Amino acid sequence: MYARVPNGVGDFKIQEPTFNSNNDMTTSINSMFENELINIYPNPSSRFVNISTEAQIDKIAIYSTAGQLILDNIDPEKSIDLLNIPGGNYFLNIYTGQNQATYMIMKH
């Protein structure tokens, strides 16, 4: 099988077929809270996103996929209001002490 490497624009090279490869998309990156359950709902959302966990959250921030800070100083006890941000995908960062977890959220 031939493919253009990288990203369909380079020279043709022989590649191994990937017929049985897993193409599932990951919608969250869990780097902490391995023993704590975190629910982020609804996702996708048109207005409010809620976080439910027993972990002690110190800080919540939302970043664009380009890394721009969109919302900061979010109260972990309240729903996150997405009204003033445009539709798209965002990273929701949750901080506790020395740890951080990043989740993908979508506003439509």
Image: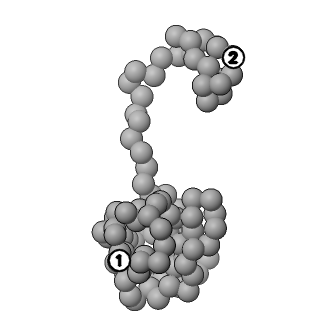
Say which residue label 1 marks. 48
Give the amino acid type for the residue marked by disc 2 in the picture.
Asp
Amino acid type, mark 1: Phe
Would you say 19 lies left or right of 9 here? left
Numbered tag placed on residue 107 in the rendering: none
Q: Describe residue 72's horizontal placement relative to residue 45 as left or right.
A: right
**Circle 2/circle 1 CB separation < 8 Å:** no
Residue 77, quarter of picture: bottom left
Badge 2 or badge 1: first in the primary sequence:
2
Residue drawn at (57%, 74%) of the image: 70
The residue under the point 41% across, 36% down is: 23
- 26 vs 14, left or right, is left
Residue 12 is left or right of residue 34, and the answer is right
**Mark identifier at residue 11:** 2
Disc 1: CA contacts within 10 A as few (<14), some (14-19) or many (>=20): some
Q: Is residue 97 visible?
A: yes
Check the picture and name the quadrant holding the C terminus: bottom left
Report helix, strand or loop for mark 1: strand
